[in-house]
């Protein structure tokens, strides 16, 4: 298992939240303890992807765990209509190397309104980052990352 780094779409800075799984790390730049789980959201604007015109929307990504133990993820998006969507969760070490990747199979077709899902990711992680990437027709619309430290 690994932890990944974050780059989001439209709201990069606003979407970055810190994950402190070991109870020794708080928000970026501080050594205060924080919660064992973290949630962040990122927005995208109206865009054309895979031949479909997509409305603006929001993707939220939550990592659950305690210490360096990962217990799973929770994710959601909210937009008027979405086509052929999926998610990739990547774990990165402190050097930025991707050491583990999990992919939600693409949900083909047209989906209306908000959707939510979870990935059964369980196991030990390394210090670093975890990132969730929301995709439509293979194109990343939004990315949210959380830091993990031992």
Image (cartoon, grey):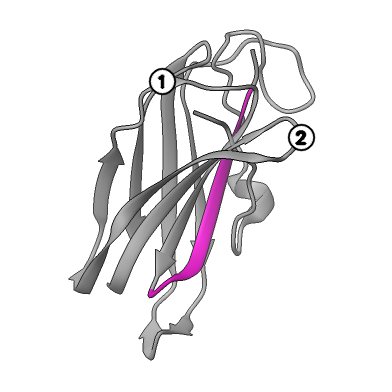
- The picture places residue 95, in percent across and down from the top left corner, at 76, 34
The picture quadrant where one finds residue 80 is bottom left
Residue 101 visible somewhere in the drawing: yes
Label placed on residue 142: none
- Residue 16 in the magenta stretch? The answer is no
Of residue 30 and residue 130, the one placed in the foreground of this image is 130
Q: In the rendered image, which quarter contains the C terminus?
A: top right
Label placed on residue 123: 1
Q: Which residues are magenta?
A: 137-148
- The picture places residue 19, in percent across and down from the top left corner, at 57, 26
- Residue at image position (24%, 55%) is 115
The answer to whether 61 is drawn above or below residue 65 in the figure is below
- The picture places residue 1, in percent across and down from the top left corner, at 49, 28
- Residue at image position (50%, 66%) is 140
Using a 10 Å C-alpha cutoff, classify the residue at mark 2 as few (fewer than 14 neighbours), some (14 to 19) or many (20 or more).
Answer: few
The dominant secondary structure in magenta is strand
Residue at mark 2 to residue at mark 1: CA–CA distance: 20 Å
Q: Secondary structure at mark 1?
A: strand
- The residue most toward the right is 29
The picture quadrant where one finds residue 9 is bottom right
The answer to whether 22 is drawn above or below residue 134 in the figure is above
Label located before the other in sequence (2 or 1): 2
Residue 79 visible somewhere in the drawing: no
Apparent side of residue 90 relative to residue 121 in the rendered image (left or right): right
Using a 10 Å C-alpha cutoff, classify the residue at mark 1 as few (fewer than 14 neighbours), some (14 to 19) or many (20 or more).
Answer: few
Label placed on residue 95: 2
- Residue at image position (63%, 46%) is 6
Q: Secondary structure at mark 2?
A: loop
């Amino acid at each position: 298992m690994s932890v990944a780094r974050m780059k989001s779409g439209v709201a990069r800075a606003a979407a970055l939240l810190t994950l402190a799984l070991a109870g020794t790390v708080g928000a970026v730049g501080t050594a205060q303890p924080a919660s064992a789980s973290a949630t962040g959201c990122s927005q995208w604007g109206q865009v054309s992807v895979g031949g479909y015109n997509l409305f603006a929307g929001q993707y939220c990504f939550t990592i659950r765990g305690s210490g360096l133990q990962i217990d799973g993820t929770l994710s959601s998006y909210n937009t008027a209509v979405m086509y052929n969507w999926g998610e990739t969760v990547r774990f990165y070490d402190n050097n930025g190397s991707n050491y583990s990747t999990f992919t939600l199979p693409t949900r083909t077709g047209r989906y209306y309104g908000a959707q939510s899902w979870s990935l059964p990711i369980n196991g030990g992680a390394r210090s670093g980052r975890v990132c969730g990437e929301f995709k439509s027709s293979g194109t990343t619309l939004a990315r949210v990352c959380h830091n993990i430290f031992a």
